[in-house]
Image (cartoon, rainbow, N blue to C red):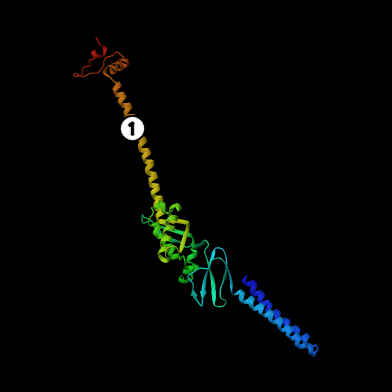
Amino acid sequence: MMWILLIFGALLLIAAFVFKYMQEDKIFYMAAEKKEAARKRVGKTVMALVLAGVICLVSSQMVVVIKTGYTGVRTTFGQISDQPVQNGFSIKIPFVQQIETVNNKLQDKTIEDQVWGETANRTAIWYKNIVVSYQIEPEKSAWIFANVADYKESLISNALVSSAIKSASATLQDAEATNRGMIEPAVCKALQDSVNGKYGEGVLHINKVTINEADFEESYKTAIADKQKAQLAYEQQEIENKKNIEKANAEAEANRKLQESISPEVLQKQFLDKWNGEMPKVMDGNTMLDISSFVGN
């Protein structure tokens, strides 16, 4: 709208001067008694065109359109008004007042660098490619514009996000610190608390924090791998020990049953089954073989 009025006003001014130049040539060749009246008519037309052009130019500096999702901040000779200008058409004093727009839509702040922290177990961990989604509250647009230098770039600083990540990771165990369902809400809450502490409550809303990469340092991962190998070896040894114990118990049970099944009568029967009826051919004087208990009465 402003540009249309500005262009239209400039065209009207150009048309006024072109019209005057062209009419001056015509008047030059008119009769003397008609020149005065012609000059008056041309003068009135030129004046009307110039006036219309000036009005359009001034109007272009008076009308401001604030788009949806934005609020305006009015300044008068550099003094910032506390009242934000709502979206739609607004009027300002030309060349005296300015209206700057502040984005109140959901915006993203991306941190691509690694941010190091520690878990509750004092384990070093890093996060990378962090996206913070935030929104400036419309009623605080003028305050942000007046009090935060270069707010479009510095409103959510890398240092603020890094501090929130370190605070959040320090409250989580190792397994939780890489779980996005736990670390992201924790960072979001810590960052909101930091923002509230810096700017005050109700100025900036942290909608979501997305962490795309997270991992532990190499020494920790090596230690975890060694621990897993040791655990696997321990479990395999436990299984082997259990099998050996079961085997030993089975052998002991078999020996017990064999021991219980062997009696003097069984031994006698096994002796007689294998004896050929002959007495020993060589005996010393002290050796005596008593078979009465084997053969019975």
Rendering coords of residue 27 (x, y %): 77, 86
Residue 72 percent location from the top left of the image: 53, 68
Q: Nearer the viewer, residue 155 or 288?
A: 155
Can residue 100 be seen in this snapshot? yes
Location of residue 134 in the rendering, given as x and y in whole percent from the top left corner: 49, 61
Q: Residue at x 41, y 66 (%)?
A: 198
Percent position (x, y) of residue 164?
A: 41, 61
**Tag 1's secondary structure?**
helix
Question: The C terminus is located in which quarter?
Answer: top left
Q: Which residue is mark 1?
A: 248
Viewer-proximal residue, 293 or 88?
Answer: 88
User: From the viewer's perspective, is residue 231 above or below residue 137?
Assistant: above
Number of residues whose C-alpha sits closer than 10 Å to that of mark 1, classed few (under 14), some (14–19) or many (20 or more):
few
296 left or right of 10 in image: left
Q: Residue at x 64, y 73 (%)?
A: 5
Q: Is residue 111 visible?
A: no
Looking at the image, which residue is at 35% across and 36% down? 242
Q: Quadrant of the N terminus?
A: bottom right
Three-letter amino acid code at disc 1? Ala
